[in-house]
Image (cartoon, rainbow, N blue to C red):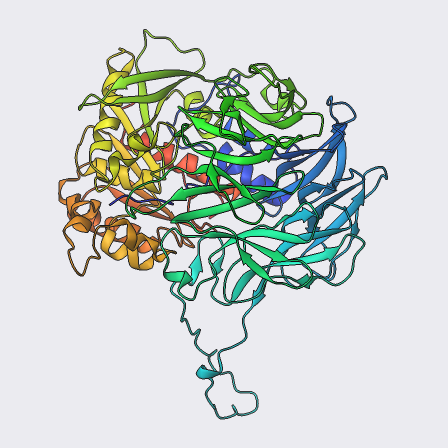
Amino acid sequence: MSPSFFASPHARRAAASRISGFASVVLLALVAAPTLGAQQAPPDHIQLNQYLDWQDVQSPQISPNGSQIVYGRRHVDKMNDRWRTSLWIMNADGTHDRFLADGSGIKWSPDGKRIAYVADGQPSGAQIFVKWADVDGPGSQISNLTESPSNLEWAPDSKSLAFNMNVTERPDPEWHISMPTPPKGAKWVEPPKIVTRLNFRSDRIGYVDIYYHQIFVISADGGEARQITKGDWNASAPAFSGDGKWVAFSSLRTPDAEHAFRHSEIYAANVSTGEVQQLTHSNGTAGGPVYSPDGRLVAYTHADSVNHSAWSEGNIWVMNADGSNPHNLTASLDRPVSGVLWAPNGAGVYFSVQSEGSENFYYASTSGQVRPVTTGTHVLLVTDMARNGLAVGTRTTPTMPPDVVTFLAPTTGTVSTFAQRTNIDASILAGKKVATTEEMWYTSKDGLKIQGWIVKPPDFDAGKKYPLILQIHGGPQSMYNVAFNFARQDEAAKGYVVLYTNPRGSTGYGTKFTNLIDNDYPDHDFDDLMTGVDNVIAKGYIDTKNLFVYGCSGGGVLTSWTVGHTDRFAAAVVQCPVIDWISFVGVTDGAGWYGNFAKPFWEDPSEYLKRSPIMYVGNVKTPTMLMTGVLDLRTPIPQTEEFYRALKLRGVPTAMLRMNNEYHGTSSTPSNFLRTQLYVEGWFQRYGHMAGAHAETQTDTQQ
C-alpha cells in the first residue's frame, strides 16, 4: 500500500490593519489569556497574536512589457474570522506600490492594456471584472454568473476570456416519485439526497455530484457567457491556442471515467463549435496544457500510473498542437515539477523544481536539455515572465516571509541573487528576534540518508536543555521545505526546539526514495523519524524528559503510529488522522484509495489491518490529544472518534477537539490557527515535566 493525496492545508499569515471591534478583541483574548504555567515568548520574540497582523503575498503577475506587477495580498478579516485577498499594483522595480481592488485570480491581457480578476459582484456571488491598466479606480463587472468563475484565461487577441464554472445537472427522471400534496401550512421533511456517483463529495467543497466543471467564454467587454464544453465530465483550467480558435484542457471523457485510477488526458475544444479532440493517449495523468507562443506546440505534465500502488513523479512533456510527437523533456530530472511557463522565444519551457527542501527555477529546451536557472536554499516560486525575460515570483527562507522578487532569466548560467520588490511584514518583524533553522542529514537504521531541520529558539544556548517537538508532515508523498513557518516560529519563541524531517516516502529525493513506502506505510518511516530524534538528542541540548510529537493528515497517521510503538514522548497530538484503513477507504472523498492497496479488503484485509494505528492502541501509554475538523471529508472525524474511544476505554489520558468550520486540517480559519497552537502547546505543558507546567489547558475565552 502506498497512500497518496493527503492534503495538509497550512493556515498562513494575516492582516496589517489595527485590531478593532468585538470579534477582534475575542481573537486577541485567545492569545492574551495564556495557560497558567505555560511558556511565554519574551517581548523581543515573535508573538502568537502577531498572526492576526501578518500578510501573505500571492501570485504576482507581470505585464507583458515587463513594466508593472500586480499581486495579491492576503489578510485576515478580523470581524468575520476569515481570509480576504486584495490586489495591489506596482512598477516592476517595486516603486509606486498601491491598492488596486479587492479580488483574486488576476491575469494581464496579452496586449498589456487590461487586467482581469474575480471579485464579489452584483447581484451576488463572485463575478469577473476587467480593469484598464492605465485608469485609476476599480474595474468593471463584465459577468452576471450564477456560479463562481475560476481559472481566468485571456484569448490571444485580448478580446475575450475563458474560464471554468460549475454546471448543475438536471434531476434524473428515473428517480421521480409522485408524492401527495402536503396540507396547507404543513412542514414536511425535505426529500432525501439521492447519490448515484462513485465520487460524490470533495473536501473543502462538500457534495460535488450535482454538477460538472465546464469551460465558458465571455467577451472582455461584457455580455453573456457561452458554454464550450459539455457532457458528464469535468474540464480543467483552459488554455488558448495561438490563434484563439481552440482551448486545451485536462479531463477524462470516457463512459467509466469515475472508476479510472490516476488517469486523465489532454483535449482541445473548438471555441466556435464545441468540437472536442483528444490530444494525448497516456497510461496515467496528463494535465496543465500550455500552448507555445507561436501555437505550434503544447507543453503539459504527465505521470505514469501503470503500477497503481506506486508513486510516479510527474514530468514535463511537449507535443505538437495536434497531439503528435509527444516527448518527455525532464526524464533525467527525477524531481517534482510544476508551474510551466514557455520561454518568450518558444525554444523551451521554464518550470519550478522541488529538491531536498528547496524550490528553484529550471529551463528545458524542446529537445530535452535541462539546466537550473536559479540556485539557493529557499522556496522560490516563479509565477510569471515578461516578454523581455524578466521573471516575477515569491521567495521565502526560514527567517524571511514570502515577498515578491524579480530577476532576469539568463540564457546561460544561474542566478542566486534576487531583487526583493515588497517587504510587507517588515513592521511586524521590526525589533523581533526570529528562530534560526539548521539543516541536518543523518543515517536511519537501515543506512538510508534522511534530511531534516532543527529550529532553535532565539538566544539559543547549547549549554542549556530544551524541550523538543517532532513535527511530522502529511502527504505522505510531500516535502517539508525551508519556507518561513509561523507555527514553528511561535513554538521556538516559547522555548521549544523543533525538529522536522523528510522521512522515506517524501518527495524531492527521487522516485526510488518516495516509493520506499510502497506497501510499507507506516513502518520504516517511523524508524527514520525516531533516528532523527536520536540524532538531535545526541547534540546534548535536549531535555529527554520533555519530548513531544504532533502531525496532521499523513502526519496524524504517523503520530498515532508512533504512540503505539514507543512511549518515549511525554505527550502527543494527533491531528486529522487515518486510524483504520478498512473504514477509511469507504468514507474518504475519493474512491481511488482502494487502488493504493494490492487487494480490496474483502479479498484480503491483512495489509489494511497491519498498517492501521488502531491495531496498536493497546500499546499506547502516551497522553494523546486528537484534533480534527468537523467538516473533514478527507480523513473524516469518525477516524478520530475510533482512536479517542479506544484510548478512553484503556484509561490513556486523551481528549478529542472537534474543530468547528474546518475541513481537512485544523487551522484554515484564523481563530482556529490560534486555538491549534494554544491547545497543542497547552497539552504539552500539561503532560510535560517542565517547571510550572501542571495546570489545565487554557479554556477558550470565546466559549
For residue 396, what is the image quadrant? top right
Left or right, residue 465 beside residue 275: left
Question: Is 319 situated above or below 592?
Answer: above
**Residue, far top:** 463
Near-viewer residue (148 or 347)? 347
In the picture shown, does residue 124 fall above or below 334? below
Q: At which x and y percent is residue 658?
A: 38, 50
Q: Is residue 11 visible?
A: yes
- The answer to which of 284 and 507 lies nearer the viewer is 284
Residue drawn at x 29%, y 31% is 512
Q: Nearer the viewer, residue 178 or 116?
A: 116
User: Looking at the picture, how far across and down is residue 129, in whole percent?
Assistant: 75, 50
Q: Residue furthest right?
A: 135
**Rendering quarter of residue 290:** top right
Q: Residue at x 20, y 45 (%)?
A: 611
**Going by the image, does 299 lie left or right of 694?**
right
Q: Quadrant of the N terminus?
A: top left
Q: Is residue 384 left or right of residue 438?
A: right
Where residue 342 sits in the image (x, y, percent)? Answer: 61, 34
**Quarter occupied by residue 494:** top left
> Which residue occupies the foreground of this view, 184 or 358?
358
- Give the x, y percent position of residue 41: 46, 22
